[in-house]
Image (cartoon, rainbow, N blue to C red):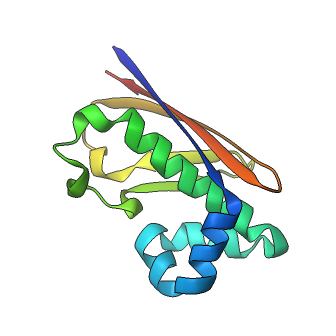
Amino acid sequence: MKVKCGVDMIEISRIQDSIESLGDRFLSKVYTKKEIAYCESKGKTKYEHYAARFAVKEAAFKAVSEQVKDKYSISWKDIETINDENGRPRTEILFLKDSKIENVDVSISHCQDYAIANVTVLFK
């Protein structure tokens, strides 16, 4: 077994600026429909949730980078974070779905200015 970890932190204002200036073009390039629906449901704090999911994508890319030919062979939407029925975030690495991934664990936190994510991947 092999354990790989990735971490990322981002300023929420950077994501907010991208969404406000590029709109659907940015959202549809980076986020899945489920992620957009979840974040939009958060009202005034939606940018914190968008930023947190962006950080998860970056952290996951870092954790699985050895499994990827090159950074251009994957897209932002190949990593999806949704919440389970208890509200806990769950991340799927869609482009490696049939690989030797045994488990993906994610931890997300955000405050007024920053979002951070830690992704740990357990390979068989």
Residue 46: x and y in percent read 74, 69
- The front one of 40 and 87 is 40
The image quarter containing residue 81 is bottom right
The image quarter containing residue 4 is top left
Above or below, 60 against 14 in this view is above
Residue 83 visible in image: no
Residue 104: x and y in percent read 48, 34
- Report the number of discs: 0
Quarter containing the C terminus: top left
The image quarter containing residue 43 is bottom right
- The front one of 114 and 103 is 114
Q: Residue at x 69, y 60 (%)?
A: 12
Above or below, 34 against 103 in this view is below
Q: Residue at x 44, y 42 (%)?
A: 60
- The front one of 27 and 84 is 27
Left/right placement of residue 95 relative to residue 36 reads left
Q: Residue at x 48, y 51 (%)?
A: 57
Left/right placement of residue 30 relative to residue 53 reads left
Residue 42: x and y in percent read 78, 70
- The front one of 41 and 119 is 119
